[in-house]
Amino acid sequence: MRFGMRLLGVMVVTACLVGVMASAATAGADEPRPFHFSEQADFYVDGECSPGVPLQVITGTGIGSHLGRVSIAGEACLGADSGNVAWTAANEDEINIRYRLVLLAPPGQDGSAPIELHALEVTGTGRFENVRLGDEPLSGTIWFFDPLGLAGHLEAEVMSTIIYDASDRGR
C-alpha cells in the first residue's frame, strides 16, 4: 500500500512538472514583446508599374529586436498611396509590410523631410508566420536626391511591440 501511494505521488509530481514545462514552452506565443527596429534604405526608379507610372525600388539594411540584421527590399508605384517592403532575417524568416508613407512636412533646402511609415497589412514567414506589429508608425527622415522625388535615401526607426510565435525562444 505504501509503495502504491509513493508511486501515485511520483506520478502526480511528474504530471505536474510536465504540465508546468508545457505551459512554459507555450507561454508568450501571443504575448506582446518590446520591438525596436531601425533601417537605412535607398530608393530609385527601375521601370514602370504601368505606362507613365514609375516603379520605385527600395533596397537597404536594418536591425531589429527579434529579427537581428535584415536585408530590406520593396517597391512602390510613384504617386500610389502604398508600397510593399520585406524585412528578411539571416535565417530567411520574413516580415512583409504593405505600408503608407506620410510626408509630415515639405522637403527643406537640403531635400530632407520628416516621414512616417504606417503598416496597413503585415504578414510573415517562418517564426513570423502569424506576426502582428503594434500601431506605432516607423518615423524618420527621407532625403530626396532630385526635385521630382524619383530617387533618395531614408532612415527610419520604430519603438513598438511585436507578437509572434516565440515558443522556441527563451524568455
Image: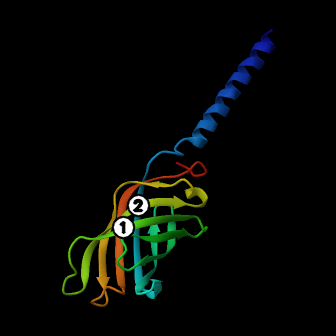
Counting other residues with Cα less than 10 Å from the Cα at mark 1, is it few (<14), some (14-19), or many (20 or more)?
some
Instruction: Say which mark, if any, is on residue 87.
Output: none
The residue that appears at 50% across and 65% down in the rendered structure is 96
Residue at x-position 45% and y-position 72%: 62
Question: What residue does disc 2 label?
Answer: 120
The secondary element bearing badge 1 is classed as: strand
The tally of labels here is 2
- At horizontal 37% and vertical 56% (from top left) the residue drawn is 160
Q: Residue at x 35, y 87 (%)?
A: 150
Q: Which residue is mark 1?
A: 100
Regarding mark 2 in the picture, which secondary structure is present there?
strand
- In the rendered view, does 13 fall on the left or right side of 103? right
Going by the image, does 31 lie left or right of 112? right
| Position of residue 83 measured from the top left corner of the image (x, y, whole percent) | 42, 71
Three-letter code, disc 1? Arg
- Circles 2 and 1: CB atoms closer than 8 Å: yes
Residue 52 x %, y %: 40, 87
- In the image, residue 107 lies at what x, y percent? 22, 81
Q: Position of residue 63 (x, y in %)?
A: 45, 69
- Residue 110 vs 31, above or below: the answer is below
Q: Quadrant of the N terminus?
A: top right
Residue type at the position of mark 2: Leu
Q: CA distance from mark 2 to mark 1?
A: 7 Å
User: Residue furthest toward the bottom?
Assistant: 146
Q: Residue furthest front?
A: 51
Residue 122 placement, left or right of 150: right
